[in-house]
Amino acid sequence: MKRLLLNTKVSKIYIISVILITLLLLTSYFSYAMFTVTKEKNNAISIVTGTLSYDLKVDGVSTDELVVGPNEEKTFTITLSNPNNRLARFNFYYITPIFENIEMGYLKIKDFNIPPEETGVNLEKEGIGASQIYQLKVINNNNEQIVINLGVEVGLDYNDLALPSNGNLFEEIFTVNTPELDNNMIPVIYENNNWVKTDEANWYNYDKGEWANAVTVSSSTRDTYLEADIGTVISMDDIETMWVWIPRYSYSIGSEDGINYYGKQGNFLTTMPTQELPGEIDIKFIEPNVKDKGTAKYLVSEGIGADDWYTPDAFTFDGKELSGIWVGKFESSSSNIEALESGIDSMNLDVMIKPNVSSWDNINVATMFQVSLKMNNPGNRYGFSTDVDTHMIKNSEWAIITYLSQSKYGKLGNVNFTGANKEVYQNKSDEIITGCSLGAPSGGTSADYGCQYTYDVDINGTGASTTGTIYGVYDMSGGAFELVMANYNGLVENSGFETMPESKYYDKYTSDDVLTSCSGNACISHGLGENWGWYNDIKELVDANNAWQGRGGAFISSIQGGIFYFDNYDDNGIAAYGLTFRVTLVNLQ
């Protein structure tokens, strides 16, 4: 197998195939040279060439033609097999002659599903001998014989992306922008029940729900880990903060019925999307120099057009277009939880972000904001440089995590979860312990309070992350009630602010109506009206009497808690039990 490496700074490229896809197949064993594309270190694109084979038979005989006589009705049995020793994609299709009076239709023998389009259906199987059987019925209402030509398109699924998948010689590829590590951030993967140091060439795979993770460690162990070999276990005792990369993307939300925009049914739901069980949000990863400003919605039956994509507002910070943002993997905790009970000033404490500890509560909004902001002060304990900005998460930043979770790259696309379990599981810990999971979506009663599963328990625990894997973001459903930097018309109220901070640090809503909340317009990409009541989550925007926004619900929430939950805080930002926050980190260079 030959490997070609093309270094490029672009994340969207056009690949031109130099191999014409043959439409007429003449033998029983066929082979194509194909291309696969994978993301490599430093934004490089790796193109891998090789050969794939397939075996096509009609009524047990190798042929590429179906012959039907004048005014004849015939049913053919077609077998398409994968003789390769790797996962491959095969698309079976047929080409009819130019006659008006031909009726055709086919069924997949295994489960009798009618293919979604008459141009073909995918066969995705592993290993030698995997096959799919179809019955193709042809009714020729003409007075002369017809010949129908069969074809097969092939592509590797061995790597993240494959070409071609639809017969086009031009394929548009969208890749994740390389996560921007600041000084002393260490990329990690999870192996053998531990977080281990990794390199940037083997770090993440968003197609598999493996979002990029990074950590910072204590100053006393930092040099040791920075100099350590790849594969070194990083002790949780040494970890101080854990981060997840949300890459820049554009999105659009589909409607299956032309009325309700609950996302598309796609490959991940067995039922039509509803408010109670919404469907897939379409995502395409983009470069910082791409900024779509379309409608953010489309009709599934018509497909997504160029004017339907929207780049979320959260990917623009103080006028800078971001390639992505880092978000705290868990709710924020404190460097000394016990000190809070002794009345020590919270501003002397530092933010920690890690699992299995108590969330930092009983501080007002202004303190949440200030302790987040000081994380990159000169001489900070984390080793962050002045090239980054750390701040309390905004509502619009919370929203981009939820949209990605409700896409094929998030928990919705995780095949280990079906039906109602597509919803991110709830943290029911009444001690507000980070990373806990009920092992089920939001619901339950006080009898269910507690930490039923920790974050690292496969399925029951990881189901509480935004990917359903250990690589997602946790505590976004339940746990403590998270305040976000979103405010009604700059009212400081009981927040602890004397005046509001710079506008780049908060989302200002001018109305309590989601249709007019952004200066008379709907706030597209803020997770408000677009996801109104998804999964039955609460939906209350800030207003003149309740000026601060909260997200996710708390451990006491029933079915109305969840990642799409938004509610105003009726104590206007004052410190309270069970009220916490999350931190975001953006690169300013």
Image: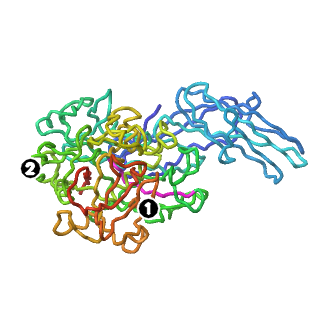
Image quadrant assignment for residue 383: top left
Viewer-closest of 254 and 24: 254
**Which residue corresponds to the image point at 53% horizontal and 36% vertical from the top-left?**
156
- The answer to whether residue 333 shows anywhere in this view is yes
- Which SS class for mark 1? loop
- What type is the residue that disc 1 sits on? Tyr
Left or right: 99 with respect to 307? right
Viewer-closest of 589 and 7: 589
The tag earlier along the polypeptide, 2 or 1, is 1
**Which residue corresponds to the image point at 25% horizontal and 62% vertical from the top-left?**
571
455 inside magenta stretch: no
Quarter of the image with the C terminus in it = bottom left
Q: Which residue is mark 1?
A: 310
- What type is the residue that disc 2 sits on? Ile
| Chief SS of the magenta region | strand
The crowding category of the residue bearing disc 1, from other C-alpha atoms within 10 Å (few below 14, some 14 to 19, many at least 20), is: many
Q: Which residue is mark 2?
A: 344
Depicted 193 relative to depicted 515: above or below: above
State which region is magenta.
Answer: 245-255
